[in-house]
Image (tube, rainbow, N blue to C red):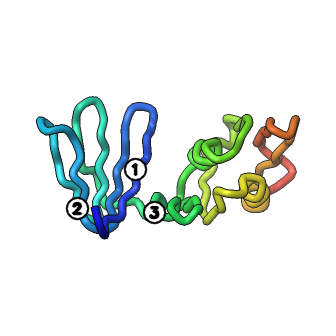
Amino acid sequence: ALGTRFNVLQGEDEVWLDVYQGAVAIGDPALRQVIPAGQQACVSAGRIRQTKSADAAREAWTHGMLLADNITLEQVVAQLRRYRHGYIGLADEVAGLQVYGNFPLQDAEQVLTMLTQVLPVKVSHTLPWWVSIEADHGKNT
């Protein structure tokens, strides 16, 4: 795999593969597919489907960044949970807010602060490892 750049993201029921350079063969001998550069594939329940162009946001992850381009706050928090020890709670009323921006995954506290600056949310630290994100009704963004 010299010169090949790709990213694999494992979800609950599926695995996403984004290929940025070269090509990647996936599957077992009975179910094998080659995914070329610039493409994305999803593997689930014994099937492979090529979905769309490779996701640039997933490539940003290799540089320690979360690229949010019109994704929900719920999706941002799901990614942040992978990098922060402890609990991050998210109120249902703000889970669907749309997020745009680049966030440093190595500094979860900075990401939480950045979110409060651009969204109508507040972050409460109940304990050092217990964080809650809720609506800030006094803020209009």
Q: Which mark is residue 59?
A: 3
Mark 1 packing: few (<14 Cα in 10 Å), some, or many (20+)? Answer: some
Along the line of sight, the residue nearer the viewer: 96 or 61: 61
- Mark toward the start of the polypeptide (1 vs 3): 1
Label 1 to label 3, Cα distance in Å?
10 Å
Q: Which of 43/70 is in front? A: 43
Q: Secondary structure at mark 2?
A: strand
Give amino acid for label 2: Pro
Callout 3 amino acid: Glu
| Disc nearer the start of the sequence (2/1) | 1
Where disc 1 sits, the SS reads: strand
State the residue at coordinates (87%, 51%): 138
Looking at marks 3 and 2 on the same chain, the residue that comes earlier in the sequence is marked by 2
Q: Which mark is residue 8?
A: 1
What whole-number distance in Å separates the C-alpha atoms at marks 3 and 2?
A: 15 Å
| Residue 113 shows up from this direction | yes
Q: Amino acid at mark 1?
A: Val
- State left or right for residue 107 relative to residue 137: left
Determine the secondary structure under disc 3. helix
Q: Are marks 1 and 3 in contact (CB under 8 Å)?
A: no
